Amino acid sequence: MLTPAVIERTLRLALDEDAPWGDLTGETVIPAEASARAVLGAREEGVLAGIEVFARAFTLTDPAIDVEVLAADADSFASGDRLAVVTGPARAVLRAERIALNFCQRMSGIATLTRAFVSAANASRPAEDPVRIADTRKTTPGLRAFEKHAVRCGGGHNHRFGLSDAIMVKDNHLAVLAGSRADVSAALREARAVVGHTTMIEVEVDRLAQIAAVLDGGPDIIMLDNFSLDDLRAGVELIAGRAVVEASGNVTLETVGEIAATGVDVISSGALTHSVRAIDLGLDLDLEAN
């Protein structure tokens, strides 16, 4: 998903947004011949994501900039660690600095939070049967590929990328079916007959009583949304391996371990991307005039 083409297209938009008519400060204050050396450093511990995006922001601004990458995506780092060194024309380095940091800080925040969720969820699970932590479509518009890449850097898994990837029947879909007096089981079987054999079908339910009819339709995945811990355990027992069981709703670092202990296969959380805190990274500059 996070291809070089996606990175370049999004960075160009971000750089143009930040300096649509150039960098007024750099072009009037910084000598044209000045060079700069800058170190990307961690000001707190975390998990790195977006280092390729960070580097490309500089080289897109000016190909004369050199970025020495000292750590890889998914690497853990401590406060004070050096993650990259940027060298090149000072005006260009200063122009790209904020955009490069914005991407890397946010992506690293997502990776760091995801790693914490994965660790908390699997603390009570057997090593041979880990639970998957997955993201959702609750992403920043235009930045989904970046944020979902960051989730993978943290050891998480991606849910569907978008509406075109899989059939996912949610509460509002079920409400429409109910209002149309349509049979849920029949609707799922009809969907299966229409789509390709590789297409997954997931159904979201919000109470145990819905599970039997959904199972009769033959879905691949059943999401138990906002279930209590007791109902999650009952749902896992009722489904009995006939579909992948996903839990969602009210998932926090404090609750994810208890949810994982109910035996579900996947835990999805929008919090991984929609309300994450950026990691504090700094770019310390050492400017020298040639």
Image (tube, rainbow, N blue to C red):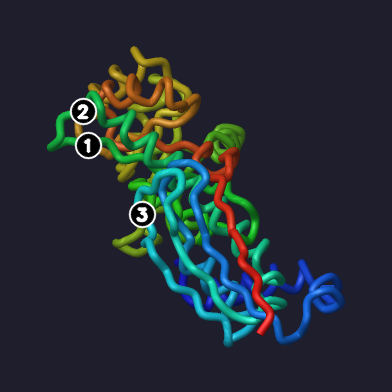
Which labelled disc corresponds to residue 130? 1
**Vertical side of 192 occupied by 62: above or below:** below
Which labelled disc corresponds to residue 74? 3
Outermost residue to the top: 230
Front position in the image: 267 or 222: 267
Front position in the image: 273 or 16: 16
Residue corresponding to mark 2:
125
Quadrant in the picture for the C terminus:
bottom right
Report, in whole angstroms, how far the alpha carbon at label 1 lies from the one at label 2. 6 Å
As shown in the figure, which amino acid type bears the numbered disc 1?
A: Pro
Report, in whole angstroms, how far the alpha carbon at label 1 lies from the one at label 3. 19 Å
**Vertical side of 72 occupied by 256: above or below:** above
Write the residue at 62% across / 70% down: 10
Which labelled disc corresponds to residue 239? none
State the image coordinates of residue 289 (x, y, percent, origin top left): 69, 80
Residue 288 in sight from this viewpoint: yes
State the image coordinates of residue 109 (x, y, percent, origin top left): 51, 45
Q: Residue 223 lies in what quarter of the image?
A: top left
